[in-house]
Amino acid sequence: MNIQFTTKSQEALSAAAMNASTAGNPQIEPAHLLKALMDQRESVAVAVLKAANIDPDAVSTRASSQIAALPKVSGSSVAEAQLSRAGVAAISAAQTWAQNNDDQFVSTEHLLLGLAVDTSATGQGLRDSGATAEALSAAMKSVRGATKVTSKDPEGTFQSLEQYGTDLTEIAASGKLDPVIGRDAEVRRLIQVLSRRTKNNPVLIGDPGVGKTAVVEGLAQRIVASDVPESLSGKR
């Protein structure tokens, strides 16, 4: 597969090699890569974990513990650490995820998904924490939407929503939205349009103060209450 890596992915792979060298490990294992990904606090991989309600700090701590338990050597072989068989498998799985998602580059979230399906202790640890391939894939869709990775720096595109938007589902989950009264018909219509296979971009039109935001808040509350079709479940 001839798929390039994003800048953040390349940095994570380099950091994984440095993690192995610093720890005195002769091979670059999945734990080294996972620790490198968790150290990139602004990466899509970390955003995906948060969207899946998984604590990146806890994942990082477990990766560090796994690294500490790996065999150690000294000498020139440490400086020339190569990817282990498990490391190669995880990266290959990441490339497959990118290809199947029609992405042009392997991004950090693809590497995370590759680790999540790995048979190593690192992969098992991710799954034990709730970071299964299914959970991460769903979280990735909520972070990225329908946007594809078409450049080496996708973080700015994906995270602009975090910077300029308001996550109403998060606010609804915290109980900070007032109940929406008298908007059931509008909310149902909104859900109907969003659930279409095509032409699924609703537009709310009306004068200021007529309650357009309340309709969206009503949708957010229904998503949190799991009172929506499966296609909208877990969306933000």
Image (cartoon, grey):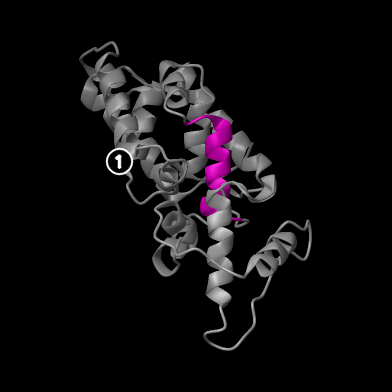
Q: Nearer the viewer, residue 43 or 76?
A: 43
Magenta stretch, main secondary structure class: helix
Q: Is residue 60 left or right of residue 51?
A: left
Q: Is residue 26 left or right of residue 54?
A: left
Residue 149 seen:
no
Q: Residue at x 43, y 19 (%)?
A: 84
Q: Nearer the viewer, residue 160 or 33?
A: 160
Residue, disc 1: 39
Magenta-span inclusion, residue 139: yes
Q: Is residue 193 left or right of residue 87?
A: right
Q: What residue range appears in magenta? A: 131-145
Magenta-span inclusion, residue 125: no
Q: Residue at x 58, y 36 (%)?
A: 95
Residue at the front extreme, as displayed? 182
Snapshot quadrant of residue 144: bottom right
Q: Amino acid at mark 1?
A: Asp
Snapshot quadrant of residue 163: bottom left
Residue 218 seen:
yes
Q: Nearer the viewer, residue 81 or 197?
A: 197
Q: How many marks?
A: 1
Q: Position of residue 21 (x, y in %)?
A: 26, 25
